[in-house]
Amino acid sequence: MEKASSSSSSSSSPRRSAYLEALTQEIKKKLTRAVVSPAQTRNLLQDLFADIALEVDQRAKDVILSKEEEDGPLCFFDVLADYYVNVSERGKDILDLMVQLWSQSFASHIFSLLFHKWLFEVEVENQEILLRYSSALVQGATNVFWIDIQTNTRRFQTLFRYLLEEVTLQPIGLKNIPIQAQRELYLLISRFIFFYNSVDKLDSFLRNFPEFPNAFLVGGAGDFLVIELTDQLQKLKVEPVLLHYLSQMKVLQGMELRMTTSTRLKACLYSFTSPGGPMYPTRAVRHAAWDALDSLFPVGRYPRHLISLFFRLLYPWYWPSSCWNFVVSCIKAVLYSIVRLIFSRREKPRQS
């Protein structure tokens, strides 16, 4: 990255600059073609998005980074985002072309990847343009994070980590964007903070939560977080991602919530505990939802399970699978107990 590259040897700096300049020229060519060829705009922008989202191969890393900087996977947008901060004039022509393609698909994706650092680290005086850029960043980041969710990957994790750690947890950087965009950014982070394994920063994130004009109706920062999470859960269709979210819901235990928010969370989790519509959860999802529900709301745990069992009895076509799963679970539990007993007996002679 550009800031880190100042510590690299001076002989590699010209090669790096030339390489990044060549990438910039290639991006400008594709954007120019997208502007002058409306029929091909979508395909050209999609190809450009795919190109900058690619992981940097070892051959390119040898040019871009020094040996000390090669500390993990790196995508082209990571390098270019730093380049457009440190050499901001190189990104001006690209921004001008992006404005002409603002309403096109993948335009916000590309902007959020290439200029997320530029937006917070380079001063923009025109407030109207700043609001437009900020809205494009939130929209583009939302789109690329959903791509990660749909593919169950973390390719854009560096973008999320920057927005979380360098922006929302550092209020100084937030002053560069309008208050409306700040609120949208915090809501965006709330929806994806579980997915990108950043729950350890949840307390700091909530302490920096901005004021909302409808806070007297909704509640505090925790209420906004839970509302966004429940909405996100109901949109998830990828089972491993849904299981990941449900497994991390336990961190909400002890959080002060309004009664309406707490009821909303309980209803959301309960909707995943029974087979069939509207969520059609798998057996693994149902068990994960029960675990989260019992952990967050231990009061009424057994009545909930009894009511659930009663309603299951109303659907005879579920009986065979339920009985089979029950028998398999019992067999696994017995085998596990036997194995533990055998190992415990083997350990006792060794200890003596």
Image: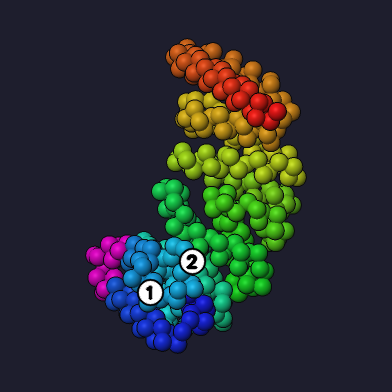
Q: Is residue 10 above or below residue 165?
A: below
| Residue 189 occupies quadrant | bottom right
Residue located at (37% from left, 77% from top): 63
**Residue sitting nearer the eye, 160 or 219:** 160
| Residue 130 occupies quadrant | bottom right
Q: Quadrant of the C terminus?
A: top right
Residue 286 magenta-highlighted:
no
Which numbered disc covers residue 62? 1
Residue 46 magenta-highlighted:
yes
| Residue 17 occupies quadrant | bottom left
The chief SS type of the magenta part is: helix
**Alpha carbon distance from label 1 to label 2:** 13 Å
List x then y, in percent, for residue 172.
Answer: 66, 73
The magenta span reads 33-47
Residue located at (48% from left, 81% from top): 8
Residue located at (52% from left, 72% from top): 117
Compare marks 1 and 2 and give the one earlier in the sequence.
1
List x then y, in percent, for residue 91.
Answer: 42, 80
The residue wearing badge 2 is: 71
Check disc 1 and give the amino acid type.
Asp
Colouring? rainbow
Q: Is residue 53 above or below residue 96?
A: above
- Label count reads 2
